[in-house]
Each structure stands twice: as structure tokens, then as C-alpha cells.
Image (cartoon, rainbow, N blue to C red):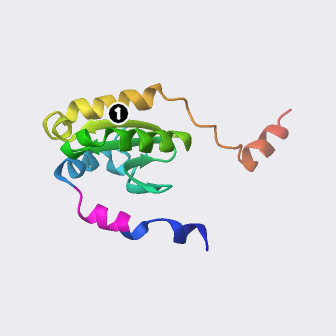
Amino acid sequence: MDKASKRPTSRSRELRANMTDAERRLWACLSARKVGGVRFNTQFPIGPFICDFVSRGAKLVIEVDGGQHADSERHDAARTHYIEQQGYRVIRFWNNDVLNNIDGVVAEISRVLADMPSPNPSREREGDRVARAQRP
């Protein structure tokens, strides 16, 4: 079985089609590289979990939690631990924070992104290397 067939893509599609109001509101702010020029995917699977928003480049997961998460702290902690073991940082916001203070939520995401280490620089392009080699 190939890697792609193990991923819960049909469930991801279903969740994207049925996002909560808070998720839709935050997605409007995150989509199209609107925060820090960083690309996010929504309802993206990491292992057995589907995360609300994921930047694979920045290795950042953003979760938007409703009231049901207040009763599932142990499950959320295990989920966060697993995702962090995959090299991601996880930040969480409550639905009411997203709905009532979207500017503050976006500012916090921007701050977290600014505090994260830069990914490895891209490898040198061949044309650049040739041009430098030809300099006197």
C-alpha cells in the first residue's frame, strides 16, 4: 500500500467542506499566504490526526477548539505530543477568541512565526554557482 492511500483524505475533504464558523473566519486570514507569507493547508492529516491548519514549511499547527475540547484535555495532550514528535509546534485558540478577537489571534500567529527559526536555506542554484566560479 502506498503512502498516500494510508492518509485520511476523504475525511479531510469532508472537514474542509464543513468547517466551523471560527475555522472559516481564521482560514480567510491564513489562506493565500496572508500571514507572514507562509502557506497553510486546512484540515491536513499528520499521522492519524487531522489538524485544522498546518504550515509544513514553518512546521506549525494551529488548532481551533470548541467547547467539546474542555472535556478532552487528555486526548488533546496526547494528540499534541504526537504532532510535536513529528517536528511541529502546536498552538491552540478557542472558537470564541477567533470569532471575537480575530486581529489578536492573527497577531499571535504572526508573533509565533517570527519567533520560529528559519527553515534551511534553499540549495544554491546551478546558474549562481557557475557565475561565481567564472568571476576573477
Tell me residue 31's x, y (percent).
33, 50
Amino acid found under the numbered disc labelled 1: Ile
Residue at 27% x, 36% y: name it. 93
Res. 58 in view? no
Tell me residue 21's x, y (percent).
17, 51
Residue placed most toward the observer, 71 or 55: 71
> In the rendered view, does 7 fall on the left or right side of 96?
right
Which portion, as a residue range, is magenta?
Answer: 11-19
Q: Is residue 17 magenta?
A: yes
Residue at 21% x, 33% y: name it. 103
Residue at 79% x, 38% y: name it. 132
Question: Relative to 132, is 50 above or below?
Answer: below
Residue placed most toward the observer, 107 or 84: 84
Q: Is residue 131 magenta?
A: no
Res. 62 in view? yes
Dominant secondary-structure state across the stretch colored magenta: helix
Crowding near pointer 1: few (<14 within 10 Å), some, many (20+)? some
